[in-house]
Image (spheres, rainbow, N blue to C red):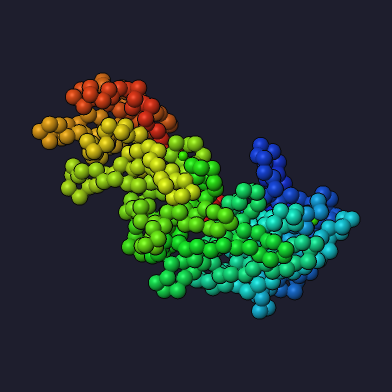
Amino acid sequence: MKKYLVLLAKAVFLLSSILLLASCAFKSTDKLLTPPQGSSEYEQLQKKIDKLIATGAEYSPPISGTYRQSVQLEDIDGDGTKEALVFLNVPTESKPLKIYIYKETDGEYTEVAVLEGEGTNVDSVNYIDLNGDGALEIVVGRQISTSIKMLTIYSARNLEMSIVTSVDYLEYSICSLSDDESSNVFIIKPSALGQAKEVEIILGMSGGEMVSTKSVLTRGAESIKRIRTSALTDGNQAVIVEGRMSDGSIFTDIFTLVNDEVKNITLNPVKGVSDKTLRTEEIYCRDIDENGIVEIPSPVMLPEQIEGVVHWLIEWYAYDSDGDREEVVTTYNCTNDGWMLIIPEQWKDKITARRVEYVAGEKTVIFSYYDENDEIQDFLAIYTLSGENKDERANISGRFTLFAENEEIFVARIYDTDFTTKYKITEELIKENFSIIYSEWNPGET
Ligand SMILES: [Ca+2]
Ligand SMILES: [Ca+2]
């Protein structure tokens, strides 16, 4: 076992050197484990770790987040030399989760502190500078039991480790909401039954005292799906939290800072719910027009063509710090086939859609309008073609190609109708408004 762990640790160092080489193309190498300069230093550190392992300690790296190595190198006191942080579990002890911190001086690692906590695993760790003094704060989330997690923030100033705060949490995220670009910790806390979940943002420290501000999540929010940060239309930064309500619908809460006070800008103060964002369709915020500001989706149901089969248009809204929203664009998202179409303003309230699959390898969405007799007339079809003869089917008379990749070809056909003429629906328009939906979800985020 011991040999295996040593090999594992060596593999971690080796892997990190490969990552370091591979990371030349990237700007941020800070998050990657960098190997010590000389192997003698490493061997000397390894001997110290081996001693701990011989007495029953086990490697126990964080199970989620960006930093997942058993041995992590970070300059936590800000003196220009990286300390080694070793994540171990000593199952026999009452506080089994231990982070040993070693400082390197003249090629020798000396133990300077041990951060200890209860629990089964370290959930995640982050290194941030809360107050901009150059020394880092260490944010450690520990899984206490299946349902309880504790977040502890340690200050590493002069390597005199002290606890800034310790709170139970459901999710947390590192963000930067203040004007000075210092880091903040955004925490969602569990709630008593029937109460709204509390949100706390650790803003920083002033004179050694932690400064924080609190708000609430939408009442009835049951689970958190995503936490992400974005600018708002007025340039202020926001944290966007999305998740599921107890009735299954999806909500979005947007938090921003106003004079160092956190505000849930989407919350209807009477209902305690961000009611304008509620939706039954499982669709999440994204930067739909790729301008750096994330938009919030608001689905609008189209009239049903086939009973019980609902299609939606998605209105995308950008918010400012006052919680006022502005529609940016309307789209039809075919998440099944992986494409979307921007819907011109004049089409809205006049169209409907259906999806058919008459032949294998040909999935079709047909857009229709209601004519003066309230009859449904088809005016546009978008085909997702796959399989052996997809090229031949792409070239069927009347069809034109929107996008082609290895496995699939996306083509369209415009029908000659009054609607087509009236709203000048051309190949150019459809090509311009069509796009493939790429996932912009970063698995590193919560
Ligand atoms: Ca240091
Ligand atoms: Ca945008």
| 16 with respect to 217 (left or right) | right
The x and y percentages for residue 253 are: 44, 55
Q: Quadrant of residue 385?
A: top left
> How many badges with numbers are in the image?
0
Against 168, residue 418 (above or below) is above
Where 378 sits versus 132, above or below?
above
**Residue pictured at 58% horizontal, 56% vertical:** 260
Residue nearest the viewer, comparing 93 with 431: 431
Residue 252 lies, in percent from the top left, at: 42, 54
Q: Residue furthest right?
A: 106
Q: Position of residue 340 (x, y in %)?
A: 36, 37
Q: Is residue 392 visible?
A: no
Image region (quadrant) for ligand 1: bottom right
Q: Residue at x 32, y 54 (%)?
A: 280
Identity of the residue drawn at 84% across and 50% down: 38
Residue 8: image location, x then y, percent: 69, 58
Can the viewer see residue 425 in this picture? yes
Q: Residue furthest left?
A: 373
